[in-house]
Amino acid sequence: MSRWRIAAALTAPFWFVGCAAVNPAMDDVSRRVDYLRQDVEKLTAQQKELAEEIRRLAAGGTAPASAPGATPAPPEAPAARARVDVQDLSSAPADQYRSAFALMEEGRYAEAERAFAAFVAAYPQSDLADNAQYWIGECLYTEKNFKDARDAFKGVSDHFPFGNKVPDALYKQALCERQLGETEAAAKTLARLREFFPESEAAAKAGALP
């Protein structure tokens, strides 16, 4: 089974395959910085929400002592305790995502793929799940594994249709399809990108493709 299928995410050094670029290295660094900034903003927002939830749950405090002769209060439900335990681990998603991203930045792409896949599997409802799925595709793309990269990028729009990475994922999916000689599929993917995300940066890049 392909690595990306473990769970349904570095811009490749050769971002403009088959295209001329004024300074591809600087563009690659700029995109990474921009994406990382967006991801950090999401992580910060998530942690604030989780911290507020923890404070809300903790505000209840312990139950007051029962008056003499009063019926003891029932023990706390296991489900409630489990929820508090999960919320107390609010830093886990952020740490796991950052660890995966660090592996990718270090060029340890196979390890990064597995780490991002594990993140998607563990936190499919996270705002960063679509980002992680996208970076799986980028790792595979950098390794020139265009078939699996295509499927990973397609997974972004298939499983996270409202995610912010969808336009870029469609663009990279089309590049993979071109590399695989699937010219008709690539044309359809680019048409979809231009139709649904006409104002995106990815659509602009698609329009510049030969």
Image: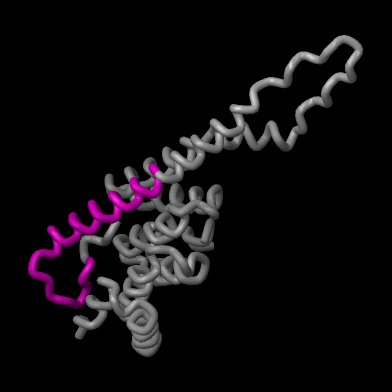
**Residue at x-position 34% and y-position 46%:** 40
**Residue at x-position 40% and y-position 69%:** 166
In the drawing, does residue 133 fall left or right of residue 186?
A: right
Q: Is residue 25 magenta?
A: yes
Query: Which picture quadrant has residue 151?
Result: bottom left
Please, which residue is most extreme toward the top here? 68
Q: Position of residue 170 (x, y in %)?
A: 37, 74
Q: How is the image coloured?
A: one colour
Q: Position of residue 12 (x, y in %)?
A: 26, 61
Asked if residue 180 shows in the view, the reply is no
Q: Position of residue 76 (x, y in %)?
A: 76, 28
Q: Which quarter of the rendering shows the N terminus? A: bottom right
Please give the range of residues in magenta. Answer: 15-44
Q: Is residue 194 magenta?
A: no
Q: Position of residue 98 (x, y in %)?
A: 37, 42
Comparing 9 with 146, the one in front is 9
Comparing 95 with 136, the one in front is 95
Numbered label tally:
0
Asked if residue 5 shows in the view, the reply is yes
Q: Which quarter of the rendering shows the C terminus? A: bottom left
**Residue at x-position 21% and y-position 61%:** 13
